[in-house]
Amino acid sequence: MPNPVPESVHPAAPAWSAEYLQEFLWRIVPGRSMRSMDDEVIAEFFREHPEHWEKIWALFTVEGAMPSNGLALWFIYDAQLTICGHDLLVYLAEHFPQYRARIEQECVQALLRDYAPQNARVFSRSFEALTAVPKGLRGAERKQALAAQAQSYARHGALIPALLASPVATTATVGAQMLQSVLQVCAPSGGSAPAGQVPLTAGELQALVAEALPAAAQLLFRREKKLMTAGLKVLELSVRVVPERTGEVSAYAQDAVEVLPLELRDRAQKLCPDTAPAQPSSIQPGSAQPASTQPATDQPPCSVQIPDVPALGLSASEVNAALNAAPQAGRASEATRDAIRNDRDCEELLFALYHLNEREQSVRRIPALLSYLHRAHQEGRIIEFSPAFQKHLRRYLSRTWHDVCDQLRYLAYRLLVQHVHAADPDPQAALTEHTGRFQGADFHFKGYPRKGSEYWAYRSPTALFHEQLRVAFGDQPYSSEGAAGQGFAPLLAEPLPAVERSFERTVIRLKSYREALPKVLHGEYEVNDSTYELWQVPGEEPATEWSTFTAAAYAVAGACAEYPGRSLEHTEVPSVALVCGWYAWAMRHNPDLLAAQYKPLLSVYQFSRLHGFEEVMQTLGAAERALGVPSYNFLAWASVASAKNPEYRLAAAEAIAALFEAGLLDVSTFAETLKWALEDGMVLPNRLVATLREVSAISPLAGWRVLQVLRLLLPMVGELTKGGDYVRLAVELAELYGTPVEIPVELEPKMKGSTVLAKSLRALAAVTPRVTEEALAAREAALALLGES
């Protein structure tokens, strides 16, 4: 954990909320465009109103108040001021030089507060921009600028150790850059400081290095490669600047040499020349002591034999039989656990849903929420909410940038309507007062826009959830035709039974967002940004208003026509995560249908948010029946789609590891799915390694299965971007489990040279067999799945 943040020497700002400060920036401060850095309007505003500087200082102390993306704010809020984030702080520092030092100081202190990474990033970018060396400088001018930069960093030297120890990667990077700059300028040879401009005295420098070295050494154990490189650079500079610390640096480097990537190990070993490289720990069978490098007997060393586990899982008929045989008491206890007891409990659950808090628990209780709302309607009872929560509902309702896909807006409208009708003698006037210009028709989910007033309406999961909400409030179907004319189906009380389906892969190309119908590709085709794949049931027709609720829930054919709308829904509407959670609960016994239905979710992995991803992955990871091709394909794509976001990557890794540990994921089938996806060019190969690394760290058996997957992928890594990363992970796992891996014939010519791939292949070929604790633990887990001891 980082060191406590010292209190600012400046007076404390008033306790403004983040929302208040955002409104101040967006509505009060004048400005014309995001690039108006030469615009004097903003500067004149603060010269005429100096009292508003207190709000600027509060931006540093109120988390989330400082917007990080001005362009996004301009699109979403139609805000007048679009100079936001680090652009605004740089602008103020340039137009008000008297405040530049304080802005820098506040940025550093903000980095040490307990802010989320996305909220801390704006301050690291600001500090980097404020202290950057101008481009184009040469010779003496550049040396003078570097010395001035080091002096600026030295003024914050007491905070550098805390910055290095920060769990936020961007903050730790700033600390490493500051320390490197100071050490480079103070280096006895090659230093950049002109006479009289050394940032620290010899004593101050030694004290700074002594305090910062432990934190810098911990960077070698971080997952981010850039932090490992930065930490190694700090250790190298420390030896040059403070030779007295050579022994301490050598010990730090020796501790970390085994966890560093292969391309950094040589540099780390140069810092500890008198110590032989450490060998991975290994143990002999029946002994807890580490085994020596040379065997004590003539018997050659051997690896632990870990048995293969065939893919387990129940069929659809077996799942249904087990459910029918299960005692009703078990299902009743689950319903009792999730039941809503009173209006206060209902409000707390709704509050969690609207804030997307405690997602796993709150989403699990959605069926109970629908049942509670329906029971209140049948009893003619009004659910009482606190005035604060009613205010929150009205505020959520007024967010006009959300569309009809946001089912929480429809829910807010219905809750406000029933509450207002009960409390006011003039219901129509009260309705207008509390819900504004909105009417019930504004939240009619017609489907996904096609063109003009036409929609794709094939009973998607969002449409089905909308129907269930209308059932809860006692509404009638929008249409009086077909099966819908007989009324809605009752609320779904339990997950739908398991069914058997066969699937076929379909590749489509979207020429435009609202074209007549996506083009289905046959034979050879070129993969580009408009090419997508999905899984369809042969001969199945899309669900329509004539389809029953159960038939519509099972149908996946509508995903083809609705592919663009469903994809954008998962990146633009946060509340779709609740719909995913509800539908995943309904499809608990049909993981392949769930995976096929939500394949469009993975087509927008280039965006930072994939709403609903975690809910789908949790359900797939808890599968109890044998997985089919759609599930394997979804897991393979999820391994790539999730790698950009640590939260999603962890969710995907936990699901895959859980399936490995339960014996439900076949290694060869999973590897073949990954291989096919990589060859087809539809996934980014450099992101897959990050997820596989996460999976391998969860349990010994999961790590062993990842090694088996990598073995099967090895023949093709020579053709992949950053294929050396795959081999490097294979080296780490092969050493961890004491299992040699044969180099494929295709890769033997690539073992020569100094590339990362060549070094990794030579290291993989050098792995020797031995017995390790991890291998023994994986063997016990595999035997437990087979029912052996």
Image (spheres, rainbow, N blue to C red):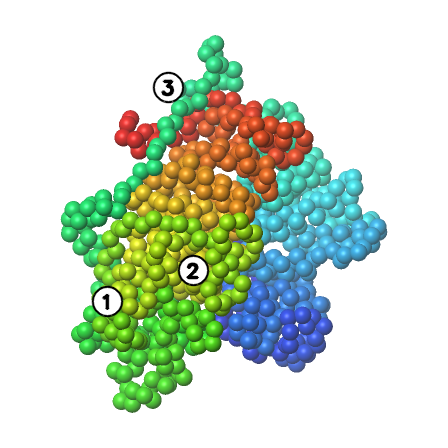
Between residue 463 and residue 605, name the one nearer to us: 463
Q: Residue tagged by mark 1?
A: 489
Image side of residue 283 versus residue 55, left or right: left
Q: Are marks 2 and 3 in contact (CB under 8 Å)?
A: no
Which residue: 46% across, 12% down? 299
Q: Is residue 497 above or below residue 789?
A: below
Quarter residue 759 falls in: top right
Which label's residue is closer to the chain start, 2 or 1? 1
Q: Residue furthest front?
A: 523
Between residue 635 and residue 370, name the one nearer to us: 635
Kind of element beneath mark 1: loop
Q: Residue tagged by mark 2?
A: 560
Name which residue type carries label 2: Cys
Q: Is residue 225 above or below residue 296?
A: below
Q: Residue tagged by mark 3?
A: 286
Residue 363, x across and y down, in percent: 33, 59
The C terminus: image quadrant:
top left
Which residue: 52% across, 56% down? 531
